[in-house]
Image (spheres, grey):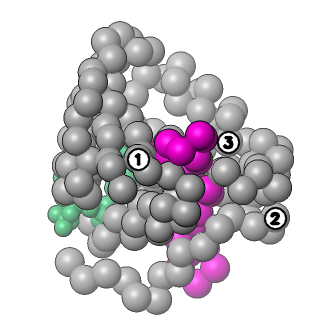
Amino acid sequence: MQLDKEISIGRLGKADFSAAAKFFRKTLKIPSYHSGEIKDDIKSYSARNLSKSVKNRNLIFLAAKNDGEIIGLIFSSTYKGTGWIDWVVVEPGYRRRGIAKRLIKEAERIMRNNTTRIWADTATGNYGAVKMLDGLGYRKIAVLGHYYNNDKIIWEKIL
Ligand SMILES: CC(C)(COP(=O)(O)OP(=O)(O)OC[C@H]1O[C@@H](n2cnc3c(N)ncnc32)[C@H](O)[C@@H]1OP(=O)(O)O)[C@@H](O)C(=O)NCCC(=O)NCCS
């Protein structure tokens, strides 16, 4: 499938926090994740918490927008030379068009300034995300058992 060239990718700004939190809440209905984890993560990325992120340059929160509307998000960060991808989510109607790939590649580009490796996690049953990270050059380095009643794969990419 062709990439949507008209879709822009950029940092979340003040005007986006409330729409981003709403988008995240709405899109985060994923059967392979435990509802407790989803609840905690929705709380972590509330509009209020997102607004606190704006001054912290170690937090790389990016949005994909189509005509000003958020259609994808990545929440990632760097800490002491290691990057972490916490969540990548794309509006269901826009999936399989390369948007998550673009979000991840842009976060990687920013992380390269102060990071030599990136870690990410997925539930073992999240087939699409597993394929996506594998295709982007991430390799499995561990499996954590029973994390929120689930198994999680930990992924690493050396930049
Ligand atoms: C996982 C997710 C972010 C992928 O977003 P997307 O924009 O559709 O992904 P892309 O189009 O960039 O896909 C890149 C590659 O990932 C793989 N992939 C993505 N979704 C897939 C699916 N459902 N089944 C199989 N492979 C999939 C494919 O290899 C794809 O390349 P291709 O389309 O050329 O075959 C999206 O499905 C989503 O938001 N899921 C819910 C949230 C989530 O699970 N996030 C991941 C955990 S952090």
Q: Is residue 83 magenta?
A: yes
- Label 1, on which residue? 117
| The disc label shown at residue 89, or none | none
Q: Nearer the viewer, mark 3 or mark 1?
A: 1
Question: Residue 39's x, y, as percent?
Answer: 59, 27
Q: Residues within 10 Å of mark 3 (few under 14, many from 20)?
A: many
- Find residue 14 and name its label: 2
Image position of 131 (left or right of 80): left
Q: Earlier in the sequence, mark 2 or mark 1?
A: 2
* SS at circle 3: loop
Expressed as whole percent of the image width and height from the top left, the position of residue 149 reads 38, 12
**Residue in view at x 32 percent, y 41 percent:** 156
Query: Which percent across, then down, holds residue 151?
Result: 30, 19
Q: CA distance from mark 2 to mark 3?
A: 14 Å
Q: Residue drawn at (26%, 30%), measured in percent from left and top?
A: 141
The relative height of residue 85 versus residue 159 in the rendered view (above or below) is above
From the viewer's side, name the closer residue of 47 and 121: 121
Instruction: Identify the element where label 1 is drawn.
Output: strand
Which residue sits at x=69%, y=33%? 43
Beta carbon of the mark 2 residue lies under 8 A of ligand 1 = no
The amino acid marked with disc number 2 is Lys
Amino acid, disc 1? Arg
Q: Which residue is mark 3?
A: 45
Q: Which residues are magenta?
A: 60-85
Q: Residue at x 25, y 83 (%)?
A: 2
Q: Earlier in the sequence, mark 2 or mark 3?
A: 2
Residue 132 x/y as whole percent: 25, 53
Distance from the alpha carbon under mark 3 to that under mark 1: 24 Å
Q: CA distance from mark 2 to mark 1?
A: 29 Å
Left or right: 17 as drawn, with respect to 1: right
How many marks do you count on the picture? 3
Q: Does 86 appear above or below 104?
A: above
